[in-house]
Image (tube, rainbow, N blue to C red):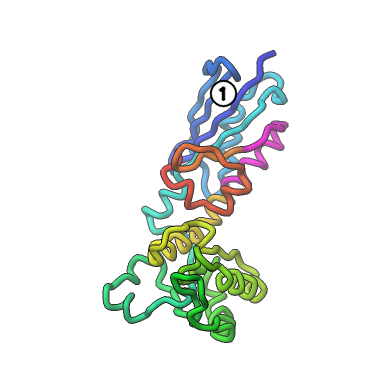
Amino acid sequence: MADYVLGIDTGGTYTDGVLIQRGTRKIVKSTKTLTTKPDLSGGILAALGDLLPDDPTHIKLVVISTTLATNAIAEGKGQPVGLFLLGYDQELIREFSLDSRFATTRYHYIQGGHDLYANEQAPLDVDGIRKTVLKINPEVEAFAISGYFSPFNASHEEQAYQLISEISGQPVVLGHELSTRLDSVQRATTASLNASLLSHLQNFIQAMENSQREMNIQAPLMVVRGDGALVEAEQAQRRPIETVHSG
């Protein structure tokens, strides 16, 4: 019996699926079902029911893509995020109205950050972080941290990560892990957007994993990034911003 690759694409309205013969790339089956919200498992299971071969163990790879992250950004439906800006110049941000690009209104300036030579420009304000987290934690679903010149020295981001994680118990995203570009505003925006999308992609991947187990599909699960590359599901859950334009 032939081996297969299974593809699922979940959009805002429809969930499309295809079963491809491995090696020949011949399309064996395809389907289109309605996307079911808020529980995506219904649409996924319906698609899998249409696509499954007689022996599901012959599916050797499952690849998924989705416009859920893109739609959430376009529709303003990301989760509320608390953004910490370590060492950013408040006056500069205000003068050029750059704060409108942060993708959240819950941004907070914290003393710290580094300079172009990776030297500490000021000690990290640990007490300020602690007080702010305790204040806004009930209002947000995740946190993002961006330190000034953190691609050269990420120690303040990492220190803030430990503190915020311990206090809040919520997901925390670090700017330097997502972008090595020196544009500090863009890096903060990327971190904030990524944090706001975490639950969207995690729910999708969890629904897919649950559906695979129910259908006895034991193949590894990969996710299509926005640039067409494949990444492991675990990595995609941490970096949903990379799936923008996927699908």
**Residue appearing at x 71%, y 37% in the figure:** 213
User: Does the magenta run of residues contain 181?
Assistant: no
- On the rendered image, what quadrant is the N terminus found in? top right
Q: Which residue lies furthest to the left in this view?
A: 96
Image location (x, y in percent) of residue 61: 63, 30
As drawn, 215 above or below 233: above
Bin the neighbour count of mark 1 within 10 Å (Cα to Cα): few under 14, some 14-19, many 20 and up.
many
Of 107 and 135, nearer the camera is: 107
Q: Magenta region's main secondary structure? A: helix
Of 93 and 53, nearer the camera is: 93
Of 184 and 73, nearer the camera is: 184
Image location (x, y in percent) of residue 179: 47, 57
**Residue appearing at x 27%, y 73% in the figure:** 96
As drawn, 106 above or below 171: below
Instruction: Specify the segment rendered in magenta.
Output: 203-221
Rendering quarter of residue 167 = bottom right
Of 77 and 225, nearer the camera is: 225
Q: Residue furthest front?
A: 117
As drawn, 130 above or below 164: below
Image location (x, y in percent) of residue 11: 45, 41
Image location (x, y in percent) of residue 237: 58, 51
SS for callout 1: strand
**Residue appearing at x 51%, y 23% in the figure:** 30
Rendering quarter of residue 189 = bottom left
Residue under label 1, please give it.
19
